[in-house]
Amino acid sequence: MKKILFAGNWKMNPVSADDARGLFKDYVSLAKRFGGKSGVKIFLAAFPPMPFLGLLADTKRPRNLFLGAQDVFFEKEGAFTGFVSPIQLLGLGASHVILGHSERRALGETSATIARKIKTALQAGLVPIVCVGEKERNHSGEFWHELRVQLEESFKGVPKQLVSKVIIAYEPVWAVGEKSKGAVSPKEIPETALFIRKILSHMYGGKIARALNIIYGGSVFPANAAEIISSGDISGFLVGRAGLKKKEIEGILNAIS
Ligand code: PGA
């Protein structure tokens, strides 16, 4: 049965614990409702702000709802002021972590740092959702080079024995967030996913690259979710804005189930 992941990146929202609890309750009820539908197996994952993780982990949730963090540090413990260890995340009930989001890359996080984070997260037992995507999609095709370098550098030193647990989120930077130009055309998704698999097959071999889960992120809404998912080779979404509103999440889940 086809498996689809709806991953909600809450970013720095909401600001109050009560609102976070309310939103998580929506995730719980939607996970229950859509978990048992026929045809596809739907999984949800909520990525709340770090201070709310422990709080939400105490809420009873169905097995098809995961909890994750929006970042983690590349060391497990020690004198690292302000950072969070993957072991601490696991202790709070998180199973997933978003790494290399474009909003963090824009603030200076490099692919080399992301590579270290992926490695430590995997070694600790977390599932990393690794974001890659071009800043611009131009006719000259330079963005393919940008994507290749990003992938090669972000996976440098990530061991072959662990890499198959990674989920890749293809998130073109220009398609993410309020000021974006909207989602990528669904036509472009299969060739981009194929390209990502090709680069990773050079690094890890065809078998691992073919089996990797690739999800799409950037302006996913109820109106375009079905078309994106049926474009092929995508096994879910990383959702920002629409992941903060029950109606929109429900609309996306309806469109893909
Ligand atoms: P968006 O954000 O859905 O609001 O475009 C996606 C993301 O940043 O992961």
Image: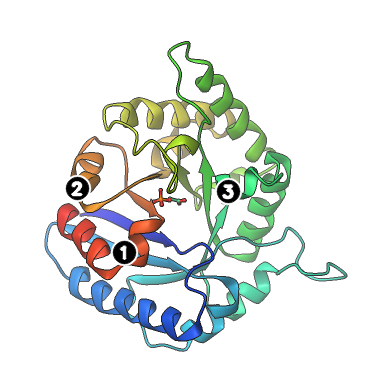
Q: Residues within 10 Å of mark 2 (few under 14, many from 20)?
A: few
**Residue 21 position in % (x across, y down):** 42, 83
Pointer 1 residue: 43
- Could you tell me how far apart the alpha carbons at marks 1 and 3 are, in whole angstroms? 25 Å
Pointer 3 residue: 103
Pointers 2 and 1 in contact (C-beta within 8 Å): no
Q: Residue flagged by tag 3: what amino acid is it?
A: Glu
**Residue 108 position in % (x across, y down):** 71, 44
**Is the CB of the residue bearing disc 3 within 8 angstroms of ligand 1?**
yes
Q: Residue flagged by tag 1: what amino acid is it?
A: Phe
Left or right relative to 176: residue 154? right
Residue 177 vs 186, above or below: the answer is below
Seen from this angle, which residue lies furthest top? Answer: 140
Q: Which of the two residues, 166 or 246, is positioned nearer the viewer here?
A: 246
Left or right relative to 247: residue 87? right
- Could you tell me how far apart the alpha carbons at marks 3 and 2 are, in whole angstroms? 24 Å
Label 1 sits on a secondary structure element that is: strand
Residue at the image point whose x is 47% and y is 39% from the top: 208
Q: Residues within 10 Å of mark 3 (few under 14, many from 20)?
A: few
Q: Quadrant of the N terminus?
A: bottom left
Pointer 2 residue: 223
Q: Quadrant of residue 32?
A: bottom left
